[in-house]
Image: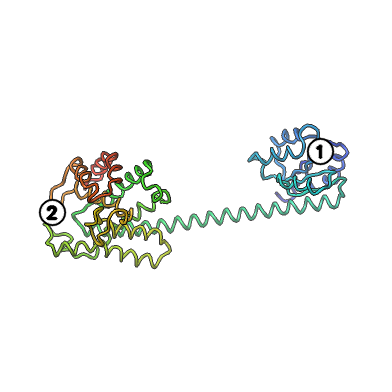
Amino acid sequence: MQEGKKEKIMLVDDNKTNLTMGKSILGEHYDVFALPSADKLFEFLKHVMPGLILLDIDMPGMNGYEAITLLKADKQYADIPVIFLTAKNSESDEYEGLRLGAIDYVTKPFAPALLLKRIENNLLIQKQKARLQDFNDNLIKMVKEKTNQLFSLQNSIISNMAEMVEFRDIVTGRHISRTQKYLKKLIEQLMEDAVYADEFLPWDLEVILNSSQLHDVGKIAICDTILNKPGKLTDEEQEIMRTHTSKGAEVIEKIENSTDFAGFFECAKLFAKTHHEKWNGSGYPEGLAWLNIPIQGRIMAIADVYDALISTRPYKPSFTPDESAQILIAGAGTHFDPALIEAFIKIKRDFAAIAAEYAD
């Protein structure tokens, strides 16, 4: 309320004497609208928003209980404080009024000093509530801004780490960008089909996709002569290359232990460690099988292998999208989770489009 400006109060009572008396008592302190019925109250509310309503209970037509029910059901008026005025003086009447949303209950005939003090106290409470709400709103806004800043910083660091891996591994090109987009399509299809819904529903898709960028971060621990060898790796070199899964998990765990983003890094760690596990248990590093492979590893296996197949490598030419899809489909039940391959079949054209759009 502006300095020197009176608070608006609506006094609703079918008794003219009460209206006259109430306006006389309150007029010096407030801008009072004396209204003879609940119907008039709702007419005036279309044009004037009061700071408080004094509402008689026993009125012909719409009574006070019915009026406050309508007020509280309307978002425009629900927050206007209501004090009931009544000649009734029983606990049940008072309880009913408070139950419907009234903030106070004054019996008639009312003492002027008491009525003024009740109004003053309740308006003060409403102002304090409004200030507290403003404070909370501003605090929530500040927390959201700080959280967004932290997530932005986190995502920037993650993206830079992922790019660092791509710069070192010259043969994989835009692999990380493509696998992110494959994963998004695959997860959305699985959610649409309600496959593994109990695992996917709690996920924040943006967080999951950002964490997937670190699935190959362990390659920073692999020497360049092996990482970028222009030819097929020896068995010994292959074993060293395979350690990028465990080393990646170790790198992420060290980051995780120094931050508060445990959920994010736990997911990233699972992507890194388990994306080379196979459905039949013949993968690495731990030889996990079936549903013992975390869902992160099972979905990343599809994205990772598809991208390797459509890409040229020193030891192989690129396969066409159709050939790559057929290889994945043939691997259902051995390399890949069959339920995930069923979803992949529905979106294999989307994978092909991603591969073409984000080609090296």
| Residue 163 appears in the figure | no
Q: Which of 311 and 336 is in front in this view?
A: 336
Q: Name the residue under label 1.
A: 58
Judged left or right of residue 301, residue 150 is right
Q: In x, y percent, where is residue 195?
A: 36, 45
Judged left or right of residue 139, residue 251 is left
Going from N to C along the chain, the mark reached first, 2 or 1, is 1
Residue contact at pointers 2 and 1, CB within 8 angstroms = no
Q: Which of 54 and 195 is in front in this view?
A: 195
Q: What residue type is labelled 1?
A: Asp
Of labels 2 and 1, the one closer to you: 1
Q: Residue 314 carries which label?
A: 2
**What's the residue at 76%, 54% (across, down)?**
121
Q: In x, y percent, where is residue 156?
A: 36, 57
Q: In x, y percent, where is residue 120?
A: 77, 52
Q: Place residue 256 in its image quadrant.
A: bottom left
Q: Is mark 1 on a helix, strand or loop?
A: loop
| Residue 68 appears in the figure | yes
**What's the residue at 70%, 46% (across, down)?**
101
Q: Which amino acid does label 2 sit on?
A: Pro
